Amino acid sequence: MEEIQYVNEHLWPGRIGNFALMLSFCASILSAVSYYIHTNSKTEKKWDKIGRSSFFVHGISAFVLIACIFYVMYHKMFEYRYVIEHASDDLPMKYILSAFWEGQEGSFLLWVFWHVILGFVFIRQKSKFEAPVMCIISVIQMVILTMVLGVYVGVGEWVYKVGSNPILLLRDTIDLPLFTNAEYVSLLQGNGLNLLLQNYWMTIHPPTLFLGFASTAFPFALAVAGLWTKEHKAWLAPALKWSLFSGAILGIGILMGGAWAYEALTFGGYWAWDPVENTSLVPWLILVAGIHTNLVSKSTGYSIRSTYMFYLLCFLLIIYSTFLTRSGILGETSVHAFTEMGLELQLVFFVGLFTLIALYNFIKNYKGIPAPPKEEAFLSREFWMFIGSLVLLFSGALISFSSSLPVFNKIIQFFDPEYVGRVIKDPIPHYNKYQIWIAVFIALLSGIGIFLRYGTPKKNLKPLFVHIGRSTLISIALVILFEQWLGLYVWQYRVLMFASAFTVVSNIDYLISFLKGNLKMGASVLSHVGFGLMIIGVLASGLNQEVISSNRFAMTGIMEDQKLGSSITLYSKMPMFMNGYWVTYSSDTLENHIRTYTLDFRKVDENNKTLEEFTLYPNVMYEKDFSKVAANNPDTRHYINRDIFIQVSGLPPSKRDIELAHAQEDTLNYIPYEVAVGDTFETERSFAILNSIDYLPGHRDYDSEENDLGVGLNFSFREKKGDSTYNAQPALGLSGNLIYQYPDKMNRLNTKIRIKEAFFEEMYTAEENLNYEGHILKQGDQIKFNDYSLTLKEFDRNPEDPNYQKEDGDIPVAAILEVEHEGRLKELKPIYVLRKNRPFSVKAYDPELGIHIRFSNIFPKDESFEIKVAKDNRVFDKVPVEIAENVPATDYIAMEAKIFPGINLFWLGSSLMMFGLALGFIRRRKLKS
Amino acid sequence: MKKSHIIGIAMIIISAIILITAVGDMSTYATLEAAKKSGDRVKIAGVLAKNKPMEYNPEKDPNWFSFYLTDTENKTEKVILLKPKPQDFERSEQVILTGSYENGIFVADEVLTKCPSKYKDEEIALRKKSSNQSRQ
């Protein structure tokens, strides 16, 4: 076959990118091997240099690869597969980052990127664990890079594709008839970024989460290093620093996901126990458990084995979560997993390899891990912290078990193809009912444990009981207070509320009594207070969500047991009362492909007195071709003690789909009418009257900037039954040579009216059909033209007119003429211009009077002037209009409005928790060991 | 025996109890037939019967949507969803409903729809010739 010379392809970014990819991959292998030899060899201590330089080469080439992908995305080079899949011509630059990590390949590279950055930081720290840790990190990098290699490995008949390469040309990945066209590149158009993902959360959430993921590799690698080198104590201090950092970042990443779900998506909350959410929460729980045992082991020598176990497990769970979300195995149980792309085997290998590494090292060295012979004392801090960690492990195990149901199904089906997979019927109650007890335990343990000290307890336990007793009493009071504000409904929630209040109170007590308010020492206190506040926030906002958008009177008789829906129908401009609010859907505007609704809320008391007024702007986003609604973005009004959350949950069919709208328009039965001003005429459903003709149309969509000329009609329609009167203002507009119709619709009357385009020509006469009549006159003269009378008043040497653009060297002059017609008086200014010694004129026209005036000549000799006048041939006496009745209404929406009370406690508490972790990290960062 | 061992064993026992009781929270996807017989709250997986009418009139009630569902046993029946009609419902590949039979009709209050992934290898979007613009 003849080689085709393709036009407009950019091959060099692909070549550089692929070279960088290969180099990065090979360097990671070399780095791993060198560091491995260095760690194991007792004599040869030079291999770390090779390891270090290879890791450096690996990192830099990974950056080059990422830069190449960005380059082709930024320049929208659609000949590259990854670009055509994730970018498009109209993708705003600010979403290039989001488009980059929308795909699996990009997000793997984001992960690689963070490992490189963190690896550089680790190398700079000159830790004695550099070689074993960087060996593990290099192996991780190598495995992740296989996901983007895109090479084929074959043994005989069997061929396996390793990874999916993001820097390949489209024509190298698939075979299309299109590629016989040498100019195919110019025909390509990108698929673009999913509209749901086009917001700033998509820019900030993934990098934070992946930094969290990447940072868990370091406690893992340090744990392996500790086992490997049998330095069972030295690794604890650096591991604590890394895991505090990781805990804070991963936690923030998870919270951002919750905030995204709550703020911008319509999941109706911040946490839904979705498998994807769960599998990032579980490693965090295990990490936090590890931080606790790590603190214990550093201070007392207890719990070193559990610290090993937790840190090893945490990273394994991160890879497991990667497997779950990227293999497609979650299928229908999750709303936001990646779609599968043939990486399943590699992901299983990823999980398997590191499980083996962890297990091998842990089991082999288990016996050698030091542990004090005597057990922890019951009233010692280390014992309570250890129990707390076990509870966290327990929580993680329960969540993992339920989230892994699809995996179990797959495994059982492998052995028994007949097996029908199981699913959790209602995930939220399922998880909640166990996790509330976990939360109770954690809160109580952290509330009491903080008052205990490491090692042997004090003899005098009285102060301990005083503190606990005091906190108990205050917490009971807080539970009662909370119930004055919101409900707790059942005893289980009262217990949870008590426990959460208890940890808040006793930790604050500890901060005041023992730390004397020194926040710097109180990182753990802050985290525990945060945890308590967060749970209180969950109880407040989760249990006490209140639906505003239900109207008991409007919704009765639909279902037997009255499951009141949470959406309500709102008609344009018709205020609707719902649970203490008057809500009016006052308008909507369409800009680009986003329709924004203006909803006015007025809160009233029992006497209908206005308490508060505000406006919210939820929107719906259409696909580019308006074929469907791609996303609806809610709007939220924030208060200190609650949020009001609203979204547009339903639209009329014709507002959902442009095709449907056209189809609907086609089915309308327009009946023609010819009416004169002042005429009353009868339609099927109304009596109508044409009140007046408008030369500046009042139609809401008519824009005098867009149109050169327009005409509108003012109609009143009186409904035959019901006796209401409605106004309609249909219009016609002329822009360039095109006449546009502006039909008007009376939704309540189900009637639509439009003016026939032919009327425009009856109204306004085109220039070529005008009969100009010339007149010579002097300043002050008056002339007659048909039944118009014109007076030349004066001149204007600086005339302004939308149809005249002044150029350098122009000499313009406008004649100011007073025109009188049928008792109406108007001033018109035709312009005479000398441009490069050539004269031309700019016409003055008044649509109401129907008169055209040109200032065509100046005779300086006798100071006289030539004016040419013409008038529109208005022959009509009736206006042709068309009216359709029984038109479906399109001016309504279904809206959902909810109150989330106390949600700020959730955000405050959870942020405080992460802040506490971060503070712990910052405090230890400077410490040498 | 150490205290931590006792606690550890207690936790294992509790997890076992929890997991046994949690079996009640799990079920296989039911079929219309089975759901009708038992009357239990179940999850049904099926596909939208595209040639049958869908009824959604937010003017009347935005929380009421009815359509025909074909379940895994190839049985098609009218079902009711007490929620606004999900976006892009017509294009769904699979519909999963949570609900139960009430007065002889399956009434769901939770829905999950699975849509075909945005990108398929065969679908390469080509530039269209710019189409005429229209206002309105």
Image (tube, rainbow, N blue to C red):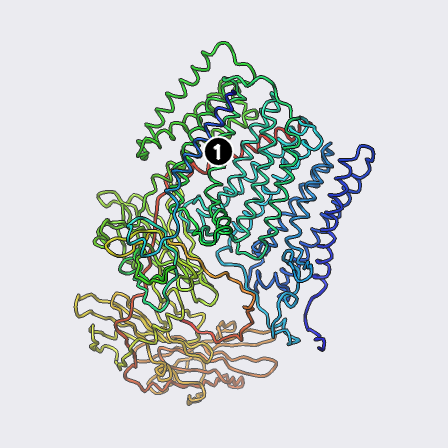
Q: Which residue is mark 1?
A: A394
Residue A155 placement: quadrant: bottom right
A82 up-or-down from A699: above or below: above
A18 up-or-down from A442: above or below: below
Residue at 51% x, 40% y: name it: A281
Question: Can you give x and y, in whole percent of width and height, for residue A274 in the image?
Answer: 45, 46
Residue at 32% x, 64% y: name it: B54
Residue at 52% x, 71% y: name it: A798
Question: Can you give x and y, in whole percent of width and height, for residue A547 in the image?
Answer: 32, 46
Residue B136 placement: quadrant: bottom left
Residue A124 placement: quadrant: top right
Q: Secondary structure at mark 1?
A: helix
Question: Can you give x and y, in whole percent of width and height, for residue A660 in the image?
Answer: 37, 70
The subunit carrying tag 1 is: A
Residue at 61% x, 51% y: name it: A346
From the viewer's perspective, is A684 left or right of A181? left
From the viewer's perspective, is A649 left or right of A63? left
